[in-house]
Amino acid sequence: MSGHSHWATIKHKKGAIDAKRGKLFSKLSRAIIIAARHGGGDPEMNLKLRYAIDKARSVSMPKDNIERAVKRGTGDVEGMTFEEITYEGYGPGSVAILVEVLTDNRNRTAGEIRKIFERGGGKMGSAGNVAFLFERKGTFSVDAAAVDEDTLLGIVLDAGADDLKRSGNTFEITCDPTAFNQVQEALKKNNLTPTVAEIGQVAKAPVDVDAETGKKVLRLLEALDDHDDVQNVYSTLNLSEELVEAASKE
């Protein structure tokens, strides 16, 4: 789990920079459009939409942008049609990678993602190649200085969480995606603001690699995440605190 949490934290910091150049808002708009198209425009009835809107609000995306994206999803406003696709492959050190994209041109995006894999020392595979190595989970990271472990354990287990573990200076909480909103509300009610709160793919068995290989994998993950059509990138890399520290010095 620590690997997932650290990568989510890196993405969160990078997201603040992306927001300044509009890239993050564009990605979040696409997620809202797709959610509204599949489940309707009411976030109370459409949990996927509620999650997408909450994520957009967390980075101060303007209300007008959010409302426009919802209307495009429900068909009230015309716009490009996006398609959800997951690409799978391997990076250096046989680390499995999942890439979730929203694209208006499947052929163009597939070619570009394939090139990024190859340039980063990896290889894109066929559908089902690595998906079985992941499971969909809700994940939260809470600052360990904000609450003691027993208190937090009681709060999140009562709300339906599966597990809580300490990793360095944070507590990491996992839950079934269906319990995500309940756990989030329970944390909010107890004045606890998680540094990471997301639903995503978590590696069933994280892979350990040496520092040099780990840095190569991180560079590939960041290159994939930087592509305009990419919504999320997940890997089986066990991203230790030592590896994060080494990568941050590059």
Image (cartoon, rainbow, N blue to C red):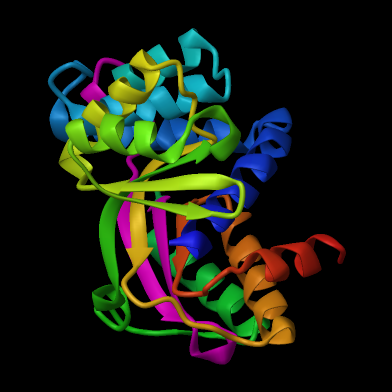
**Which residue extends farthest top?**
64
Percent position of residue 229, x then y: 50, 51
State the residue in front, 206 or 82: 206
**Which residue extends farthest bottom?**
93
Q: Vertically, is 44 above or below 6?
A: above
State the residue in front, 45 or 192: 192
Residue under the image location 49 percent in, 30 percent down? 147
Specify whether residue 91 is painted magenta. Answer: yes
Q: Quadrant of residue 97?
A: bottom left
Give the position of the N terminus as an image quadrant. Answer: bottom left
How many marks the image carries: the answer is 0
Percent position of residue 210, x then y: 67, 87
Q: Vertically, is 124 above or below 241?
A: below
Residue under the image location 37 percent in, 34 percent down? 152
Q: Is 37 positioned to the left or the right of 199 in the image?
A: left
Give the position of the C terminus as an image quadrant. Answer: bottom right
Q: Vertically, is 167 above or below 73?
A: below
Percent position of residue 121, x then y: 63, 87
Inspect this view and state whether residue 78 appears.
no
Residue under the image location 26 percent in, 15 percent down? 76
Q: Quadrant of residue 224?
A: bottom right
Residue under the image location 63 percent in, 54 percent down? 226
Specify whether residue 117 is painted magenta. Answer: no
Write the start and end of the magenta stretch as one range. 73-102
Inspect this view and state whether residue 44 appears.
yes
Percent position of residue 186, x then y: 29, 23
Q: Is 93 positioned to the left or the right of 141 in the image?
A: right
Q: Is 238 positioned to the left or the right of 250 in the image?
A: left
